[in-house]
Amino acid sequence: MGLRVANITKRFRDVTAVNGLSFAVERGRILGFLGPNGAGKTTTMRVILGIIQPDEGEVAWNGRPLAYWGREFFGYLPEERGLYPKMPLDEHLIFLGRINGLSHRDARDRAAHWIDRFRLGEYRRKRIEELSKGNQQKAQVAGAIIHEPELLILDEPFSGLDPVNTGMLKEVLVEQSRAGCTVIFSSHRMDQVEELCEEIVLIHRGELVLSGNLKSIKSGMGRQILRVGVEGSRDFWRRLPGLTLLAERPDYLEFRMGRGVDPNMVLKEAMAAGQVTRFELAEPSLDQIFVERVGAGA
Amino acid sequence: MIPILIKRDFTSRVKGAPYIITTIIGILVFVGLGFAPLVMQYFAAAFSEGSLELLVVDYSGEFYPAMAEVAAEREGQSIRIEAVPPEEESAAYQRVLDEGMNGLLLVDLPDFAFLTPDAANYGQNAWVENLVNQSLTRLNARNLGLSAEEMAQLFSSADLQVRQIGGNGDEVSSEDFTSSAVLAYCMLFMIYMSLILYGNMVASGVAEEKSSRIMEVMIAKVKPTELMAGKILGIGALSLMQFAIWVAAALVTSAVRRAGWFGSSLDLGISLGSIEPSLLAWFVIFFILGFFFYASIYAAGGAVVSRVEEVNQVVTIVTMLIAAGFIAAFMSFTNPNGRLAVITSLIPFTSPMVMFARLTLGNPAPSQVAASVLLLILAVAGGAWFSGRVYRIGVLLYGKRPTLREIVRYLRA
């Protein structure tokens, strides 16, 4: 049970924004939704939420089409943030709670809870336009989760937040997921995705590139990253076939190993070049996977 | 869902300065209208209580006696005239200045001249002219040898009695008629102003939702038609509440006047309090239908722009249509059952104002009233359909404003 996106295609005149995209998320998981700019992430999210209709394919939640569930089951933070600028913060959250089906009393209580949770207490009666950008964003996240949705879709939720607020939002997302909420968020910050997500979906030019459990994706790639630190000549590796230099750091070099490269051979050459201070086999980072799959230009 | 949206659109504006200020101005206007007769009487009284002091140099020798007679017959007016011999003419004007009199009248038939230090005082000049004319007429009549009776006969004028007879044979008294004409102008103007004011409020409200980007959150949760309906109804409720406040102010004013605290001579006058209930009902019907019709068009206009600043460019044409309706209604007042009035009272763009104007003054055929209302209701439905379509696509479009051709394509989609 959870979200199933089956073979959706969306065209805008002659541009195909999403092409035959399928993926699934189990209930209570956090899914990182990745892709370079213009890959079709926002369009996919809008299709999932029923804001726009796909030309082909369908979206199901717990085995039933979206229309069955009504609009209360999801919460949405769009990429283009927006609130009514003239409304006071608390009234605005109550309003968002109300249009998501809460009674006035519940909406008031939850608004108070989230204002507290996001440390917005001193701005409770302030108009939205008087809040800083970061605080507006927290307000909008609060508005998206005030009705405790089953599915939470956040488009770039961390952009524009300082480290303290980023940490606060991460905590909230983990909390929501533990409480059974399925969270899908897009981000350009791969470190945040790695930290939070069990699952990822990577799309490029509207098509699926990669999807599944982040750990198994990484281990499936093998330990193909090699970090070697040598005090001495740094040119030892040039004689070895199958090594690609990825990064040159002050204290080590990072390589991708091609097929059939024996790490022991590399170690031997390194030892010959000088004192080895570091030798490490690792899985690729999400960043590296991303760059490799969609190209460095993305 | 819609009630929540209505409430938001209502409460977020009702506390705003523009709404409060226009409401207060309206109250002042209605209270002012209610007391207008009192004010006018006050000024009229102030004028006639004033006095006219003239020196007259009469070279003809026969004019002054006639003038003295006429002045003496003017009851309730304080007129003092004094003849000055022609040889003292040069000193006479100095006397006018010294004694603060109104002026010096020089008579050398058939010529008259009025020398005054206050030539811009039209009230005074009119008074003098009137006095001179009446005196001259009397002098001429006497010279022609007419007796007083013959004179009265010569100057008798017909008193044309205009009487409007209603469909049921009852007569509408002419005093009611004047009063209702003024009222009709006021109410027509209210419809006109409110359609433009609140229509623009709808358009800029929609554009505001787009430019503040709240639209995407809302559209994910609420159907575009619900969003549009909530906005139109919320703002419509604002305007109806404003009308209700104004009518209440007018009723209180007329009650205060009837209570007689300001003297008893105030029966005639203009007050919404004397309005027929049926007229008020027509006012509400035509305002609501007209507002729904125009507001849905304004909403579509707001939906095709990206920023609030662009709203004016798009809605100007709608505002001009309303102005056309107002002008047509105004022209219909002179001939409420003429061809122009009949045709424009059937076209939905102009009918809310023209048919209302005809109902206040003329007596339009019931079949025409029914056709007008029916066409307007159909137009409201059509306008909602049209705007709902434009709105649905327009609200998520940013950047370039769509061309007319693209709008037509939305309609087919």
Image: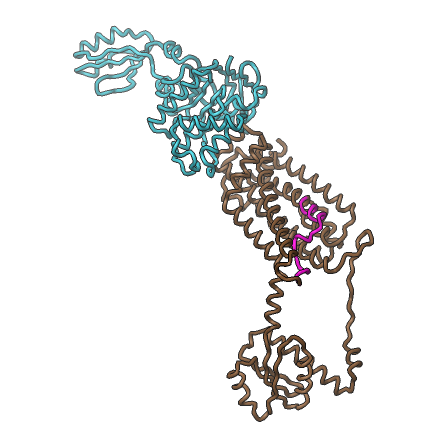
Q: Can you give x and y, in whole percent of width and height, for residue B404 in the image?
A: 59, 40
The answer to whether B326 is drawn above or below residue B143 in the figure is above
Q: Residue at x 39, y 13 (%)?
A: A214
Q: How many marks?
A: 0
Task: Give A52 or B319, whichever is nearer the viewer.
Answer: B319
B97 relative position to B254: left or right: left
Q: Residue at x 64, y 85 (%)?
A: B111
Which quarter of the picture shows residue B49? bottom right
Q: Is residue B270 magenta?
A: yes
Task: Give B310 or A26, whichever is nearer the viewer.
Answer: A26
Among the chains pictured, the one given brown colouring is B
Q: Can you give x and y, in whole percent of width and height, for residue A97 in the image?
A: 50, 28
Quarter in which the C terminus of chain A is drawn? top left
Which residues lie in the magenta part? B265-284
Q: Is residue B218 magenta?
A: no
Among the chains pictured, the one given cyan colouring is A
Which quarter of the picture shows residue A254? top left
Residue B203 shows up from this direction: yes
B289 relative position to A149: left or right: right
Task: Give A143 or A244, whichever is nearer the viewer.
Answer: A143
Q: Can you give x and y, in whole percent of width and height, for residue A197 in the image?
A: 40, 17
Which quarter of the picture shows residue B48? bottom right
The answer to whether A222 is drawn above or below residue B355 in the figure is above
A234 relative position to A294: left or right: left
